[in-house]
Amino acid sequence: MNTKGVMEMITAKKDNGEYVIPKILYADAYSSEMVAYADLILPDTTYLERFDCISLLDRPISKADTAADAIRWPVIAPDHDVRGFQSMLLDLGARLGLPGMINEDGTAR
């Protein structure tokens, strides 16, 4: 899908005037054209600042008949008040009380 198609999709409205996509959350280490459309902007870490797991099955850089994964370990500390997107999602799930995210006493796992 090209940029024009994406912009048409996120600005599309129903017959009653409500947006087809009601809320847009944007999480990234850098600003882009999506910031203008976002309802909530969450600053993310850069690849040098985060823990991460990367499956190379969806980004094949190894031999075609070889499965490989990579673990990313941060090499620098974030210099701003940012959190990795994955940890933010886990925290949000615990705050919402989603199953599997909280203990029986209501504390985060």
Image (cartoon, rainbow, N blue to C red):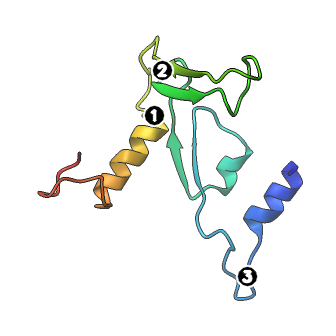
Report if the CB atoms under discs 2 and 3 are less than 8 Å apart: no
Q: Where, quadrant-wise, is the C terminus in this rendering?
A: top left
> In this figure, which residue is indicated by the disc labeled 1?
84
Where does label 3 land, which residue?
14
- Name which of mark 1 and mark 3 comes first in the sequence: 3
Say which residue appears at 75% left-offset and 66% top-offset: 11
Q: Quadrant of residue 62?
A: top right
Q: Are marks 1 and 2 in contact (CB under 8 Å)?
A: yes
Left/right placement of residue 30 relative to residue 91 reads: right
Is residue 70 placed above or below 19 in the rendered structure?
Answer: above
> Outermost residue toward the front?
65
Amino acid carrying label 3: it is Lys
Q: What secondary structure is marked by label 3?
A: loop
**Disc 3 packing (10 Å; few <14; some 14–19; many ≥20):** few
Give the vertical position of 73 relative to 93 (above or below). Answer: above
Q: Secondary structure at mark 2?
A: loop
Residue picked out by circle 2:
49
Q: CA distance from mark 1 to mark 3?
A: 34 Å
